[in-house]
Amino acid sequence: MIIAILFGAVAAVAQAPPLTLADIGLVGSECARYDAAADRYIVSNINGPNPGFLSVVTPDGTVETLHWIDGSASRLADPFGLFIEGERIYVADVDAVRIYDRRTGAPASSVVVPGALRLNDLTVAKDGTIYVTDSGKGDQPGAIYRISRRGKVVQWAARNDALEKPNGIALLPDGTIVHGGRGVNLVFRNAAGKVLRERTLPTGRIDGIVALKDGSLFVSSQDGHVVYHVGPGMGPITVVAKDIEVPAAIGYDSKRNRLIVPQIRAASLTLVDLPPR
């Protein structure tokens, strides 16, 4: 059953109640990603003034290893966005992208981003190119950087107020890069950084973006306290999770058709099983 809500073109899909995992040791849970090869969830924890850490959570909600990668031992300060590609886990960490072995959690390498203020989220192309957002700091605007496979860093989208402090970023199957920020627009760019189009959502402060194989997106909005499904092109916008206080950098469990929604202030993880699409 589909229930229409605000803005006419937006609908909310009826589904089973979500499961929220609270009081499990997470601290400032910012990002969650599905590690399909190991069938597990990797969660980044900002951890206030203390070194951050990454946790491993099983799909049944069990914390397998709370401090799997611990900042006190691996120079990890404030892990925000995560991306899993092949045998590597990429982490956006203030002014550097840190790379770890997906199987063991051992440090593999890192790339310092000169001039970065607060790296936030990232995505990695098949050729190893990294795109990472910088949400700025205070009144200072954000930027987006591109890091080549050889480690060369360039400012891909110049630091500018028009970027609206970019946060979530994802790569579509056709190579288009999409990002969002404090506003209500998703911005789509080609590999050269040229804006191709924009898509306006009902609510803004866009955080996590997950690109699906069909070109559609899952997008979390902190202002709306929701997660949207955005159809390809000008397809419909559907609310697939609601009443979430601060939905951050979401993940998607493709095996179970499940959203993984970290909540920073609540230090929790909400699992939302979606109806068949």
Image (cartoon, rainbow, N blue to C red):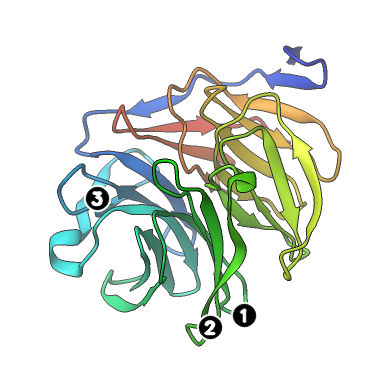
Residue at disc 2, secondary structure: loop
Q: Which residue is mark 2?
A: 149
Q: Earlier in the sequence, mark 2 or mark 3?
A: 3
Residue 248 shows in the view: yes
| Mark whose residue sits in front, 2 or 3 | 2
Q: Counting other residues with Cα less than 10 Å from the Cα at mark 3, is it few (<14), some (14-19), or many (20 or more)? A: few
Left or right: residue 38 versus residue 255 is left
Q: Residue at x 27, y 75 (%)?
A: 107
Disc number placed over residue 168 in the picture, else none: none
**Label 2 with label 1: CB-CB less than 8 Å:** yes
123 above or below 252? below
Q: Is residue 89 above or below residue 226?
A: below
Position in image of residue 58 (x %, y %): 34, 47
What is the quadrant of residue 39 in the picture? bottom left
Q: Which mark is residue 127?
A: 1
- How many angstroms separate mark 2 from mark 1 (CA)? 7 Å
173 vs 123, nearest the viewer: 123
Q: Quadrant of residue 256?
A: top right
Q: In x, y percent, where is residue 184? A: 66, 32
Label 3's element? strand
Residue found at the far bottom of this picture: 150
Q: Is residue 23 left or right of residue 261?
A: left
Q: Which residue is found at the position 66% from the left and 25% from the top?
A: 239
Indicate the position of residue 99 as horizontal and vertical percent values. Answer: 37, 72
Give the amino acid type for the residue marked by disc 3 in the picture. Answer: Glu
Q: In x, y percent, where is residue 230? A: 73, 37
Amino acid beneath label 1: Asp
Horizontal side of 2 relative to 15 (left or right) equals right
**Disc 2 residue type (three-letter):** Arg
Tell me the CA gap for discs 2 and 3: 32 Å
Q: Tell me how far mark 1 sits from mark 3, CA to CA.
A: 32 Å
Quadrant (top left/top right/bottom left/bottom right) for the C terminus: top right
